Image (cartoon, rainbow, N blue to C red):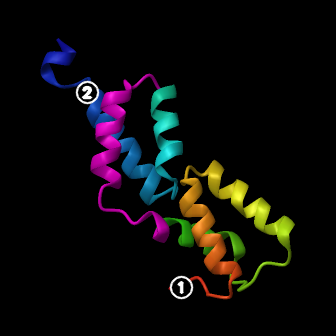
Amino acid sequence: RLLESGALDDGRVARAFARTAVTVKHRGRLRVMRELLQMGIRSDVASEALGEVYGEIDEQALIEDALRRKLRGRTRLDDQREAARLYQFLMRQGFSPAGVTAALRRFRGGQPIDQD
């Protein structure tokens, strides 16, 4: 009866969880997918929800926002070890390896991360 009335809807739960993860927690798609699967949401339902929520979101902007918050106003990295730690942090947040690498490469190349 709950399924028929729509009270139990995995798609709705997945979309709400993904919206919160991206807007409040600033997490990447890969981490949110992993968390949805751990919650017992079917992969096809989770993929559809992520497509809706992350469809128009610029991953590079999310990564750069995470870098700004993590670096707290600093404009350069101290050394290679710090870059490696940032890479691991961003990967744990669920961003794609290519996106993380590109953002760190721009930042280390002297191109500042946009300050809002």
Residue at (26% x, 23% y) in the render: 8
Side (left or right) of 67 relative to 55: right
- Mark drawn on residue 82: none
* Residue 56 drawn at (x, y percent): 30, 61
Q: Which of 56 and 10 is in front in this view?
A: 56
Which residue appears at 45% of the width and 33% of the height?
36
Question: Of marks 2 and 1, which one's residue comes earlier in the chain?
Answer: 2
Whole-percent x and y of residue 38? Answer: 52, 27
Give the quadrant of the N terminus. Answer: top left
Residue under circle 1? 114
Give the main secondary structure of the magenta stretch.
Answer: helix
Secondary element type, mark 2? loop
Q: In which quarter of the image is residue 82?
A: bottom right
Tag nearer the camera, 2 or 1: 1
Q: How crowded is mark 1: few (under 14 residues within 10 Å), some or many (20 or more)?
A: few
Give 77 or 41, whichever is nearer the viewer. 77
Say if mark 2 contacts mark 1, CB within 8 Å. no
Q: Mark 2 points at which residue?
A: 9
Magenta stretch, residue numbers: 39-61
- Left or right of residue 30, residue 72 in this image: right
Is 59 a magenta residue? Answer: yes
Type of the residue with mark 1: Asp
Q: Which residue lies furthest to the left in this view?
A: 5
Picture quadrant of residue 15: top left
Mark 2–mark 1 distance (CA, rounded to whole Å): 39 Å
In the image, what residue occupies the spot 72% across and 63% down? Answer: 86
Give coordinates of residue 53: x percent, y percent.
32, 51
Residue type at numbered disc 2: Asp
Specify whether residue 63 is painted magenta.
no
